[in-house]
Image: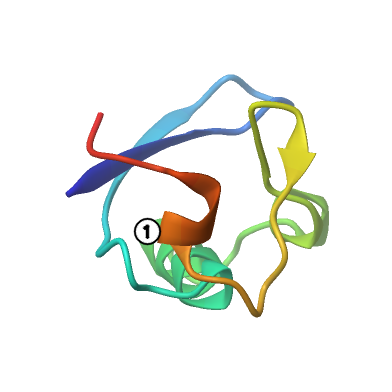
């Protein structure tokens, strides 16, 4: 599936390939890789989905995140 992540500071929209059973920490790693390993700490510190802060130790499926 593909997940879209938007950086609220600059509005950049990223398209990240992920699996529903990926951990949120895996998604953060993929975001960092997509940004060339230079993702700002603020971007990766707090990911939110539908006003919920995503916990690194949970799977994406725990938040009912589906293919966009």
Please, which residue is most extreme toward the left here?
1
**SS for dot 1:** helix
Q: Is residue 17 visible?
A: yes
Quadrant location of residue 58?
A: bottom right
Tell me the residue that label 1 is attached to: 34
Relative to 24, does residue 46 appear above or below in the rendering?
Answer: above
> Can you give x and y, in whole percent of width and height, for residue 64 in the image?
44, 44
Residue at 69%, 48% in the rendered image: 47
Q: Is residue 35 visible?
A: no
Relative to 44, does residue 2 appear above or below in the rendering?
Answer: above
Relative to 16, does residue 27 appear above or below in the rendering?
Answer: below
Give the quadrant of the C terminus.
top left
Could you say which is closer to the camera, residue 51 or residue 31? 51
Quadrant location of residue 3?
A: top left
> Can you give x and y, in whole percent of width and height, for residue 54 in the image?
69, 55
Could you say which is closer to the camera, residue 66 or residue 11? 66
Quadrant location of residue 28?
A: bottom right
Residue at 22%, 38% in the rendered image: 67
Estimate how packed mark 1 is, as few (under 14), some (14 to 19) or many (20 or more) residues with alpha carbons within 10 Å.
some
> Can you give x and y, in whole percent of width and height, for residue 37 in the image?
51, 72
């Amino acid at each position: 599936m593909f997940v879209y992540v938007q950086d609220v500071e600059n509005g950049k929209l990223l398209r990240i390939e992920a699996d529903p059973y990926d951990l949120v920490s895996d998604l953060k790693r993929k975001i960092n890789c997509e940004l060339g390993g230079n993702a700002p700490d603020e971007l990766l510190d707090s990911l939110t989905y539908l006003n919920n802060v995503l916990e690194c130790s949970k799977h994406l499926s725990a938040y009912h995140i589906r293919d966009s």
